[in-house]
């Protein structure tokens, strides 16, 4: 093999076959050169391989690092998502959500007031006065609040929980944990895993005289690794509950999108003083507009169509404001067209729908959001100029259907609010 290679090498520089004359010397010299070249090639191959290997190693390390970072960002995103979702879930339990109470300065507490956070979970120690609750009652109480009785996974959690319990009534009373004995005598946590900690009291372990299920109770003021006792299903105690966080596998993109959507929704809610949950999120599913409102682009509109008596302009505005909205502000021709399309002739040709447009003391027509009107879609009839509220008259020319009206006249009206709409 080597000679063949060297021959090729020898021949190639000048492209002529080797001469018989002085062939040996030339050959040996050439052979040496060839060997040299070969060695060089070998070395460079080795070096090249080394370089490649080094690069691979580097890129492997890089991939590993990137991967770790991905895992980290994912778990951060997951936590954020869960927190946002949890917050949203908590908000949606209200009929109207008092934003200022729970989320002062637009920051919502990660655990509800009264709950204590430990690591990524929220705990509540039920401290109401007697009558306390049996284990089944305690669990139902927790589950009604989309939580469950506390599950203890390790010594830190046991220490945290123990630290937050206080002696009450007598040495037999304590706090129920989410731990019970199954029919086949295994101690199982409410999340389904077998107990391996077994922090049972050593001196006064109860063996309840019952054919029913036996439950675990944490007794305060005892050794942290020996403070659980047993109770039957009649014994009433305090208890500890913990919010269940829904951890689920999801891709970064999905999580990011979910986070943005949740964050946006939350941002939308936090812009209110009180958020009408029932209106926007019936059955805890949020929709862009409150029930009965019509969406157009980024806004929701309510066309007040109740029978007489209708409302004066100030009453109309109060009605809208009571629904965390205001009288409609028309910003452009499309909106004017949409609004016009949704008004219907009623009563007589002088009646219409109040707009959020009124005349100030210095005779400027100003919208309720504070900006001067520039559209001026007034009817062509002579303007009385003594009437200070704008009314849209149905069945008129699209660009000439506003009329000056008496603010104390009673009319239908149109409310407008932001749409709870996520667009990415
Ligand atoms: C958000 O929480 C609700 C319950 O409040 C749950 O049904 C839903 O699956 C959660 N969504 C995510 C993405 O975790
Ligand atoms: C749980 O909720 C149900 C239905 O709302 C109610 O009947 C029950 O009394 C609640 N239980 C507890 C312990 O609060
Ligand atoms: C429990 O309390 C002890 C003593 O006050 C303290 O050293 C420990 O850090 C606390 N542990 C937890 C998990 O709260
Ligand atoms: C719990 O322990 C019992 C008995 O050791 C076993 O049969 C059962 O499969 C275990 N359950 C779980 C969820 O590990
Ligand atoms: C347990 O069941 C047995 C047989 O059914 C019965 O005789 C006994 O009284 C029960 N004990 C309790 C404490 O309910
Ligand atoms: C708590 O119990 C453990 C195990 O039985 C023991 O080692 C420890 O000394 C006890 N601590 C106290 C404060 O009694
Ligand atoms: C949520 O949105 C606010 C602005 O509305 C922004 O400051 C914040 O960083 C966002 N948070 C997340 C987790 O996306
Ligand atoms: C607005 O709400 C207040 C307080 O709930 C109420 O007294 C008033 O009648 C409401 N106004 C209208 C126009 O619905
Ligand atoms: C208004 O109604 C007309 C005629 O029905 C229709 O062509 C137009 O698209 C509607 N405009 C809006 C903004 O709803
Ligand atoms: C509205 O118009 C009046 C008169 O032209 C002017 O004095 C006032 O500053 C304007 N207001 C706004 C908010 O632009
Ligand atoms: C509506 O008014 C505009 C401008 O005055 C005019 O050009 C148009 O012909 C009118 N349309 C109708 C249907 O009256």
Image: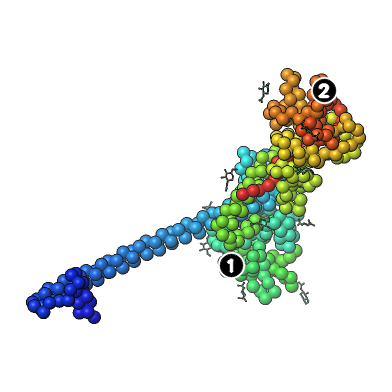
The quarter of the image that holds ligand 2 is bottom right
Position of residue 84 measured from the top left corner of the image (x, y, whole percent): 62, 50
Which residue lies at the image location 17% right of the left edge and 73% below the top edge?
A: 16
Query: Which image quarter is the N terminus in?
Result: bottom left
Position of residue 385 measured from the top left corner of the image (x, y, whole percent): 80, 20
Which residue lies at the image location 67% right of the left edge and 76% below the top edge?
A: 184
For disc 2, the marked residue is 382
Beta carbon of the mark 1 residue lies under 8 A of ligand 6: no
**Is 362 placed above or below 223 here?**
above
Asked whether 124 or 39 is in front, the reply is 39
Determine which quarter of the picture holds residue 153: bottom right
Tell me, yes or no, if residue 162 can be seen here: no
Asked whether 202 or 218 is in front, the reply is 218
Is 53 left or right of 416, judged from the image as shown?
A: left
Q: Secondary structure at mark 2?
A: loop
Where residue 418 is drawn, which disc sits there?
none
Beta carbon of the mark 2 residue lies under 8 A of ligand 11: no
Q: Secondary structure at mark 1?
A: loop
**Is 118 placed above or below 152 here?**
above
Where residue 198 is drawn, which disc sits there?
1
Position of residue 128 measured from the top left corner of the image (x, y, whole percent): 71, 51
Asked whether 373 or 84 is in front, the reply is 373
> Of tags 2 and 1, which is closer to the observer?
2
Name the residue furthest bottom: 1
Q: Earlier in the sequence, mark 2 or mark 1?
A: 1
Position of residue 47 measured from the top left corner of the image (x, y, whole percent): 27, 66
**Is 22 placed above or below 177 here?**
below
Q: How dense is the environment of label 2, judged by Cα within 10 Å: few (below 14), some, or many (20 and up)?
A: few
Which residue lies at the image location 71% right of the left edge and 28% below the top edge?
A: 373
Is 206 left or right of 58, judged from the image as shown?
A: right
Which residue lies at the image location 76% right of the left edge and 38% below the top edge?
A: 337
């Amino acid at each position: 093999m080597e000679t063949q290679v060297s021959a090729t090498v020898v021949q190639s520089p000048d492209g002529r076959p080797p001469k018989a004359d002085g062939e040996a010397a030339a050959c040996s010299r050439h052979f040496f050169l060839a060997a040299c070249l070969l060695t060089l090639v070998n070395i460079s191959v080795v070096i090249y391989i080394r370089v490649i290997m080094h690069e691979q190693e580097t890129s492997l390390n890089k991939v590993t690092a990137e991967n770790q970072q991905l895992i980290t960002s994912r778990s951060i995103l997951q936590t954020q998502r869960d927190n946002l979702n949890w917050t949203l879930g908590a908000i949606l339990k209200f009929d109207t959500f008092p934003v200022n109470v729970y989320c002062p300065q637009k920051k919502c507490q990660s655990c509800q007031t009264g709950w204590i956070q430990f690591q990524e979970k929220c705990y509540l120690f039920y401290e109401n006065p007697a009558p306390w609750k049996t284990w089944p009652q305690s669990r139902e109480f927790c589950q009604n609040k989309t939580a469950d009785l506390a599950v203890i996974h390790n010594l830190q959690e046991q220490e945290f929980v123990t630290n937050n319990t206080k002696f009450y009534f007598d040495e037999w009373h304590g706090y129920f944990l989410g731990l019970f004995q199954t029919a086949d005598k295994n101690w199982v946590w409410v999340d389904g895993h077998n107990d391996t900690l077994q922090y049972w009291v050593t001196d006064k372990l109860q063996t309840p005289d019952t054919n029913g299920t036996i439950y675990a109770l944490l007794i305060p003021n005892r050794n942290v690794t020996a403070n659980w006792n047993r109770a039957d299903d009649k014994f009433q105690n305090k208890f500890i509950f913990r919010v269940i966080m829904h951890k689920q596998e999801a891709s970064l993109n999905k999580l990011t999108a979910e986070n943005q959507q949740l964050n946006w929704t939350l941002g939308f809610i936090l812009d209110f003083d009180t958020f009408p949950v029932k209106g926007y999120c019936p059955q805890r599913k949020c929709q862009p507009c409150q029930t009965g409102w019509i969406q157009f682009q980024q806004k929701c509109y309510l066309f007040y169509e109740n029978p007489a008596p209708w409302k004066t302009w100030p009453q109309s505005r109060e009605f809208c404001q009571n629904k965390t909205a205001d009288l409609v502000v028309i910003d452009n021709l499309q909106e004017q067209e949409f609004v016009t399309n949704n008004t219907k002739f009623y009563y007589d040709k002088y009646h219409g729908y109040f707009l959020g447009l009124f005349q100030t003391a210095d005779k400027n027509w100003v919208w309720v959001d504070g900006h001067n009107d520039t559209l001026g879609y007034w009817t062509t009839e002579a303007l009385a100029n003594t009437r200070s509220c704008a009314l849209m008259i149905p069945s008129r020319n699209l660009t000439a259907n506003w009329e000056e009206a008496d603010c104390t006249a009673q009319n239908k009206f149109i409310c407008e609010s932001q749409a709870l709409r996520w667009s990415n």
